[in-house]
Image (tube, rainbow, N blue to C red):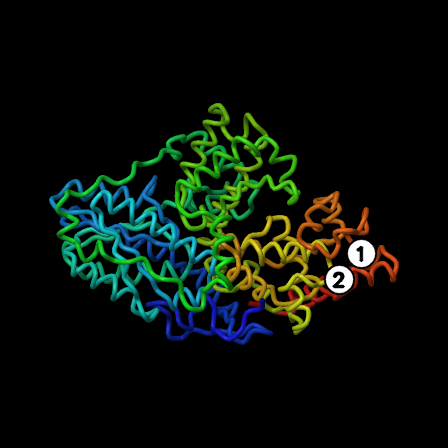
């Protein structure tokens, strides 16, 4: 269903702990609650990136003072004890002193509402937290859940927790989005004011950290193909990048009693606004997406055993279902990219990823895309603030087609390939990547509806939502896919369409791809399926003309 009623954005208007007071925001046509900074403000942010500010602060936050209690601060992108770089560093530091290792998860309900997430993703994270908490309990390591009732309370809550528990060292893993970086900047500034307290943020989400791969001129690469080649070269030259670190050492037995109140912390309940539509939906999605690290690694094992060898051949065919379906586990840090790639390399008989099995090469390329998107988010941080990478696309005059929007959300556009994708999303909280490309192209190109509304719909419905991936995937483009030719190429027998659009189950041959155009009027009327909301050819041309006009009419 369509979104309505709540304010939601990634803007400076209510930005966590450290928003500039001079913030300038604009509304999105068709959704007055969806806001974004002006392109000029986005450009300013790129010139003074939060990542660079945080990195400089962290260099000054390092300290060699003797450890007391040591804290690892879990985020929603590292919910595991296995190969967790920040957690491992905290564990090692705790071993150097006479104190204990403490862990913490900061729950901010208003952040969840503001940034958005789906019921499926929130449940997946909370269930994974329960598994993690049980694992840590067995090691006498407390996992404390603290809550910030207001978004601007996060720093105060963290600093109070540090003081209450006599913590000398704080570790966490880096998140690359603007709001999250600003949160860490705020904490880092407060840490600077304290004696005998340090704050270290590690790189855990990627094999090669952002900005590490440079172009010939010494600047960061901004095009994927050369980045991919350089990534392969870098990881081949430095196999230690795939080294995994052990799970944390346990605390002494007395720690559970000493930190009894922390150990008794309970994982939060689902927010009222994020409840499943029914108990049946909850059970179905939990079966589709079982929580926890072990479930993710089992899924990897199945993929390597059954599908990776045929991945290249069938990766664009959703009916073949050869995708790994590991994306939810990556997006919430339930599994480690290093652990996954190390195991994949072992399956590939030790060969590097561009050698050996061609399916491995093709699949790993998708993982490198994930690293590239984080790299780009650091270079152009405005991309995490509801602004397009190409800022000029913000000047496009979008259409206000509420009927088309509703049909798109429900999978009733009259375009089988688009409708199948949207219905899969609404049922599974997941969509095949090829369909993600198609439905986004249709919304912003053929319907000419502001792409940010579609991006937000994905946020609120995907179990594997990931801001870096999602924003780059929704970037507007002059390329507008033909839903008919794409379906004929990627669903040759129409099996995917028939699965998700059962009204067309009996349609034979190529009519399945365009029933309104290829069946007689009488045949089509028997289907109980809508005719196309818009003409593809006419609207594709309209979009190209609109882009050409509006992108060249403004200067930033």
Q: For numbered disc 1, what is the local secondary structure?
A: helix
Horizontal side of residue 66 vs 91, given as left or right: left
Horizontal side of residue 495 vs 51, given as left or right: right
In this figure, what is the number of numbered marks?
A: 2
Q: Earlier in the sequence, mark 1 or mark 2?
A: 1
Report the residue marked by disc 1: 515
Q: Is residue 474 visible?
A: no
Q: Residue 284 at what x, y percent from top left?
A: 51, 53
Q: For numbered disc 2, what is the local secondary structure?
A: loop
Badge 2: residue crowd in 10 Å (few <14, some 14–19, many ≥20): some
Which of the image's four quarters has the C terminus? bottom right
Which of the image's four quarters has the N terminus? bottom right
Q: Residue 334 at what x, y percent from top left?
A: 40, 46
Report the residue marked by disc 2: 529
State how far apart marks 1 and 2 are (Cα): 9 Å
The disc label shown at residue 447, or none: none
Discs 1, 2 touching: Cβ within 8 Å? yes
Q: Quadrant of residue 80?
A: top left
Q: Residue at x 30, y 56 (%)?
A: 105
Q: Is residue 287 visible?
A: yes
């Amino acid at each position: 269903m369509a979104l309505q009623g709540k304010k939601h954005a990634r803007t400076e208007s209510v930005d966590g702990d450290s928003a500039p007071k001079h913030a300038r925001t604009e509304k999105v046509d068709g959704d007055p609650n969806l806001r974004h900074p002006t392109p000029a403000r986005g450009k300013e942010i790129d010139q003074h990136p939060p990542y660079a500010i945080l990195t400089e602060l962290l260099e000054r936050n390092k300290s060699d003072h003797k450890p007391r209690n040591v804290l690892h601060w879990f985020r929603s992108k590292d919910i595991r004890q296995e190969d967790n770089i920040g957690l491992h560093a905290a564990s090692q530091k705790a071993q150097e002193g006479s104190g204990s290792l403490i862990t913490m998860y900061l729950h901010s309900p208003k952040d969840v509402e503001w940034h958005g997430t789906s019921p499926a993703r929130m449940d997946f994270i909370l269930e994974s937290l329960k598994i993690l908490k049980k694992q840590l309990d067995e090691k006498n390591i407390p996992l404390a859940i603290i809550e910030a009732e207001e978004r601007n309370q996060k720093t105060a809550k963290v600093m109070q927790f540090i003081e209450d528990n006599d913590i000398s060292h704080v570790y966490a893993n880096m998140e690359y989005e603007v709001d999250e970086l600003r949160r860490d900047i705020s904490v880092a500034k407060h840490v600077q004011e304290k004696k005998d307290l340090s704050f270290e943020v590690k790189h855990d989400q990627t094999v090669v950290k952002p900005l590490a791969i440079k172009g010939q001129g010494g600047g960061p690469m901004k095009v994927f193909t050369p980045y991919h080649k350089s990534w392969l070269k870098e990881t081949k030259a430095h196999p230690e990048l795939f080294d995994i670190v052990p799970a944390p050492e346990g605390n002494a037995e007395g720690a559970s009693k000493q930190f009894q109140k922390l150990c008794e912390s309970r994982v939060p309940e689902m927010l009222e606004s994020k409840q499943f539509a029914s108990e049946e939906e909850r059970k179905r999605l939990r079966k589709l997406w079982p929580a926890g690290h072990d479930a993710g690694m089992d899924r990897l094992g199945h993929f390597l055993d059954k599908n990776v060898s045929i991945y290249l051949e069938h990766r664009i065919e959703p009916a073949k279902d050869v995708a790994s379906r590991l994306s939810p586990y990556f997006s919430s840090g339930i599994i480690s990219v290093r652990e996954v790639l190390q195991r994949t390399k072992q399956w590939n008989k030790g060969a590097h990823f561009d050698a050996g099995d061609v399916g491995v090469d093709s699949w790993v390329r998708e993982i490198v895309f994930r690293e590239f998107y984080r790299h780009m988010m650091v270079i152009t941080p405005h991309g995490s603030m509801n602004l397009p990478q190409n800022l000029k696309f913000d000047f496009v005059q979008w259409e206000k087609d509420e009927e088309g929007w509703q049909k798109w959300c429900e999978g009733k556009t009259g375009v089988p390939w688009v409708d199948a994708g949207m219905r899969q999303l609404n049922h599974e909280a997941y969509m095949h990547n090829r369909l993600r490309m198609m439905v986004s192209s249709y919304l912003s190109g053929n319907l000419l509806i502001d792409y940010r509304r579609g991006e937000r719909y994905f946020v609120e419905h995907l179990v594997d939502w990931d801001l870096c991936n999602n924003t780059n995937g929704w970037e507007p483009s002059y390329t507008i896919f033909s839903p008919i030719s794409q379906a004929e190429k990627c669903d040759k027998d129409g099996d995917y369409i028939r699965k998700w659009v059962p009204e067309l189950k009996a349609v034979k041959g190529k009519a399945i791809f365009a029933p309104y155009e290829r069946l007689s009027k009488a045949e089509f009327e028997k289907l109980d399926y809508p005719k196309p909301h818009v003409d593809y050819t006419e609207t594709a041309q309209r979009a190209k003309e609109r882009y050409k006009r509006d992108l060249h009419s403004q200067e930033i």
